[in-house]
Amino acid sequence: MQTTPFANTDIPISRVAFGAMGLNCAFGCFEEKDLIRSIHHSLDQGVTMFDTARSYMDSERILGKAIKAWNGAKPFINSKAIPSEANGNPGWGMPNPVDVAYPKGSIRKSVEESLRQLGVDSIDLMQLHQYWGNFYNAGTWMEELQALQAEGKIQHIGVSIVDHRHETALELVNSGLISSVQTIINIFDPLALDSLVPACQKNQVAVIARCVLDEGGLTGMLKEDTTFEEGDFREKYFINGPQSEYVARVEKLKQYVPEHADSLAELAIRFVLTHPGVTTACISMHVPKFADENIKAAAKGPLPEAVFHEIRCHHRWLHNLYTGFYFPDAVDADTKTGVGGFKEMKKRSLDDV
């Protein structure tokens, strides 16, 4: 497993991180014992960073249970403080005022519950799950995080940027107040590489790239008639493409396989990790065989510069597929589950995958 230092520390971070949203039935619901087995499998393969959130329901508890049963070195744990909503606005598609999203005391409450669920005394990185540019120098969220850091309950402070709005964090990155930024970076949306990632490099801020495989769409698993179980995060995601166009755009990427990558998934992972300013690629690895494939892909190293440049320039598709979650009337208000709001699903075994 390749590693790189976290921010301006000597803490080694694996180039692929375990995205723990999948522990919460986001991409199919699995037995808890199997999910714990998947966490241990990733640890065995050298994964050192695990990214969860208070809003991922059972994710923190399952991760904490798995780590407690682990005999090796404790991994680097990230979580995110849960935001509040107002007047029916969850705050993902458009912002609530900062004192509504994170009223005084809410950060501490969220962090202390995360500590309890994870079963740890300190969380390595606590991120604001819902960061908007107008939160900069506003509200009490930063003061609360700094106080928790001084108390040793969290070690580092970061933010997670809402969907594709990369440049909203530029001012905060340049302020020197944070250690990390989490944002979407993938073949279809490489915009963070233009301004945000270089700013992070300059300020020694870690970059956690998420949606690297775009909820699995960039692996080539999607067909025009593919459907997902009710409650699966992807059920209302790809249809906003529309799905037929999404599939057509992925099809064009096959020209790079197998000459420059053994699979579309490998191409997507190596594309993101080619930029030296990206610290780690956060990917769902709740299925052991997927973890193995992701780790193997990262080990292949960067893409050739010419291939990286061609993909970055000619395969971008700046389209917000979260529209149906944010504004459900655009799809079907009666079936909206919302970002982070997952319906109860029947659990199955990972052996069936």
Image: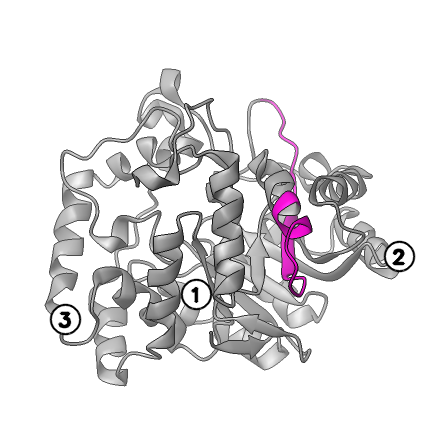
Give the residue at mark 2: 151
Q: Residues within 10 Å of mark 3 (few under 14, many from 20)?
A: few
- Spatial CA span between label 1 and label 3: 27 Å
Give the residue at mark 3: 258
Tell me the residue at 21%/47% (across/down): 221
In the picture, the disc for residue 73 is: none
The answer to which of 134 and 129 lies nearer the viewer is 129
Tell me the residue at 43%/36% (across/down): 26
- Spatial CA span between label 3 and label 2: 51 Å
Residue type of the residue flagged with mark 1: Ala
Give the residue at mark 1: 192
The answer to which of 332 and 70 lies nearer the viewer is 70
The x, y position of residue 55, in whole percent, is: 60, 37
The answer to which of 110 and 260 lies nearer the viewer is 260
- Tell me the element at label 2: loop
The x, y position of residue 260, in whole percent, is: 19, 76
Residue type of the residue flagged with mark 2: Glu
Residue 77 lies within the magenta run: yes
The magenta segment is: 65-87
Asked if the residue under mark 3 is in contact with the one under mark 1, i.e. CB atoms within 8 Å, the reply is: no
Mark 3 or 2: the one toward you: 3
Colouring used for the render: one colour
Q: Is residue 164 visible?
A: yes
Residue 75 lies within the magenta run: yes
